[in-house]
Image (cartoon, rainbow, N blue to C red):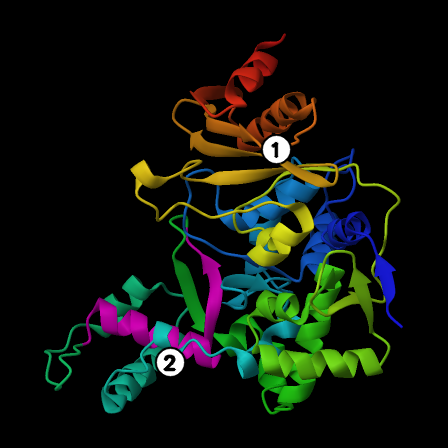
Amino acid sequence: MPSTLSLDQARRIALAAQGLHKGRPTGPVTARTVGRTFARLQLVQIDSVNVLVRSHFLPFYSRLGNYDRDILQRMSAKHPRRMLEYWAHEASYIRPEHYQDLLLWQKRAWVGASRMDPALRDEVAARILGTLASSGPLTASELTTLLGHVEERRVENWGWNWNAVKRVLEHLFEEGLVSAAARTGQFERRYALTSTVLPDAAAAAGEKDSAAALQRLTEAAARAHGIGTIRCFADYFRTPVKATAVAVENLVDQGKLQPVTVAGWERKTFRHVDSVLPRRATGRALLSPFDSLVFERRRLAELFGFHYRIEIYTPEPKRRFGYYVLPFLLRDRIVARVDLKADRAGGRLLARAAFAEPGAPPDTAVELARELQLMGQWLGLPEVEVGQSGDLAARLGQELARP
């Protein structure tokens, strides 16, 4: 019979699995510490929005505090490579050992050139692969310049222009023939042959056991969750729910997952056997809108009673909380949300709006002020300025004004 857990216990298991259940390291954060954190998370989502800082930097800040972002640059761009770009939850940095498994299960054909004239696509692909074989890593625009322009001569009106090259590059990226060797300062991918970016991938290319691959991905997702449902695990790497359900059954049979019951939850729930249940949670963190703790919105609402929506694409008059809103985790609750922006020219971290959640503890403003000061130090923005919007803004401003 499945063991029964309270909601508080389930929440603490989830926080521990994500490394958010305790305070940050007190000493310098080393590359090894960052690597361990990435191994725990399994992936970090990439997003181009840079209103505060690139999104993949934030999950490490949330868990480690003031760390050197160059560590991530080295992990993703130098051999031996410890982070690799590919499709997962969305565009993500993944652990290289998951790459071949994801190639079997990620189907993002709409991103690339699946609808192009196959003959033209193959022509462009052959020229791209030939160019990359004899050059260093190149951006899409650099490849376009090297390939030159060919007059449009196909029914679909596809010429060898920037758009065609970029689309074929994405097609080759999805197929695993090219990868991102690095990113430029403008966050453009620098493409290279996968055989040069990840040499071990070529050796493993013949392994096509899709069931075993999905089982490995599902266990990795379950380990990162600590506790969750089939839908939670499938959402982590965006694998098919029905196939993930079969993988979960196999993992239960192998003793790697345990069925559990969580008070108030009606869905089948599973706990990874290596998950930890802390006696209490003592952490504090601002979370990226793309943090893996908040990926699955239903789970977020069930665990924390927190209803979250990214409002970047919502017209400004219709936004409830702001443009780039970060949830604020305090101990074992999400107690507030704050709309943040980096004013790099002015050296300021702008909290344009701050809202307390219902039942937020009395020390919410105090702890959020400390968190914003720490984030400002990490980003090199020594001044924190609070706007007037939101029921927490006035108290937050008062705390930040204290000497």
Q: Is residue 169 magenta?
A: yes
Q: Amino acid at mark 1?
A: Pro
Report helix, strand or loop for mark 2.
helix
In which quadrant of the rendered image does the N terminus lie? bottom right
Residue 143 x, y percent position in the rendering = 30, 69
Residue 125 x, y percent position in the rendering = 33, 82
Quadrant in which residue 65 is drawn: top right
In this view of the protein, which residue sits in the foreground, 47 or 358?
358
In this view of the protein, which residue sits in the foreground, 78 or 244?
244
- The number of numbered discs placed on residues in the rendered structure image is 2
Marks 1 and 2 sit apart, C-alpha to C-alpha, by 56 Å
Q: Amino acid at mark 2?
A: Leu
In which quadrant of the rendered image does the C terminus lie? top right
Q: Tag 2: Cα neighbours inside 10 Å, few (<14), some, or many (≥20)?
A: some
In this view of the protein, which residue sits in the foreground, 13 or 144?
13
Mark 1 or 2: the one toward you = 1
- Residue 129 bears which disc, if any? 2
In this view of the protein, which residue sits in the foreground, 338 or 333?
333
Q: Outermost residue, top direction?
A: 403
> Which residues lie in the magenta part?
160-184
The residue located at (37%, 80%) in the rendering is: 129
Query: Vertically, is 125 above or below 55?
Result: below
Residue 117 x, y percent position in the rendering = 23, 87
| In the image: residue 345, left or right of residue 256 | left
Residue 391 x, y percent position in the rendering = 51, 23
| In the image: residue 185, left or right of residue 118 | right
| In the image: residue 41, left or right of residue 256 | left
